[in-house]
Amino acid sequence: MAQNTTPASQKNIVILGGSYGGVSTAHYLLKHVVTHLPEKESFQVIIVSASLTAMCRPACPRALISDDMFPQEKLFVNIPKVFEQYPKGSFRFIHGTATELHHTNRSVSIKLAIGDTEVIDFHALVIATGASTPSPLLGLNQGDEFLRTNWAAFRKVLPTAKSIVIAGGGPAGIETAGELGEFLNGRAGWFSSKLANPKVLITVVSSDSKILPALRPAIANKAEEYLAKVGVTIIKNARVKSVTPHGAGTDTTTTKATLTLENGETLDADLYIPATGTKPNTSFIHETLLTADGRVDTNTSTLRVDKAGPRVYAVGDVASYSRPAVHLILSAIPVLCANIKRDLLLASGKEESSVGEDRIFKEDTRETQMVPIGKSKGVGAAMGYRLPSFLVWLIKGRDYWLWTTGDLWSGKQWSKEM
């Protein structure tokens, strides 16, 4: 039987999701919002996450090859531990998964990792459940144990693989192809345009007329040149129609597969990695609150979920206010938290004139994306400016943003109100 465990006097600020959006929001609220509320002792910030750890998800294309690629204690960070810095009772971590949002009676049902179900009433709710990757190698779909188990199985068969097919010409697919290509095949010499006789045939299938559709053609072409040097072949304007056996690449990462493309061509793969975008984690939310693509219908200016009633918000890849990108999540956090603060003060009886106006989010739509290709090359643009390979390596390619996540997970990044 589901238990409702909320004391009548307690006001829960519930955050669903323990990745970039959820962890950042919790730190920001605990540092700059709860402390300014009347009766601040009655508020508790609660993170609900299927994983005990947060991780630098962008690092998966390199991390899946070996634990030696990154210091594991930096790659995976224990969420409850980084919140021990706050006053006792102000924060709670729940290891579990949201199974149903009851937005009309303002509660959420949680299936706990230990098997029980708990129902939590919320005074405010932030949906930051992110999105799942089709391949269990490329994200924290079911927690870190599940991810590590899949990496271990993949690494076991990798040395004997002779052909690898990756579906998807976006950053995840291209970065994975580049990392595997360099690791397994090495890199062609300075004067060679492509690697002759690669040890492993690595093929990327892209449904677009070019890879990396968010970047201009000249940058995408450069990426193709770098991929050719590590033995990667690109098939463009092609879509995977079916995979045999069913579940290869998604349910299991190590099964040999035959891929049939829409044009009838078939590809045999010792290893198949689908990297065809992500699916928002919204199965627990009523369809009236979702957009056609399955994301939470979020006000693009205020980050409120207007249809869900007062003090409900969404941030990150699960929300519809912007395209999915870490830099856009981080730029949304101060706006989101300022509006949460305003709404909580109004709910506590403050006059509208004393709490100021809504903060407004504006998506930066300039061409911004960095794609490492192996350990020393990369392509990309930032704020509309094309970046040389060296800068892509310096900013992202060295360690796939691991140099930035320490301050983010610990909350130091949000030490000042922005």
Image (cartoon, rainbow, N blue to C red):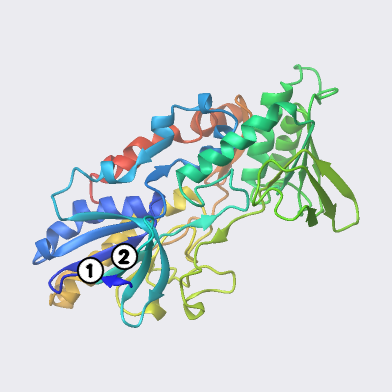
* Amino acid type, mark 1: Thr
Mark 2: few, some, or many residues within 10 Å (few <14, many ≥20)?
Answer: some
Of residues 56 and 346, which is closer to you in this image? 56
Q: Is residue 293 left or right of residue 190?
A: left
Quarter of the picture holding the N terminus:
bottom left
Q: Is residue 351 left or right of residue 220?
A: left
Q: Earlier in the sequence, mark 1 or mark 2?
A: 1
* Amino acid type, mark 2: Arg
Q: Which label was assigned to residue 5?
A: 1
Q: Secondary structure at mark 2?
A: loop
| Quarter residue 91 falls in | bottom left
In the rendered image of this protein, does residue 42 appear above or below residue 347?
Answer: above
Q: Which label was assigned to residue 319?
A: none
Disc 2 designates what residue?
359
In the rendered image of this protein, does residue 119 appear above or below residue 199?
Answer: below
In this view of the protein, can residue 236 be seen by the observer?
A: yes
Give the x, y percent position of residue 298: 44, 70
Q: Is residue 160 left or right of residue 287?
A: right
Determine the CA span between mark 1 and mark 2.
33 Å
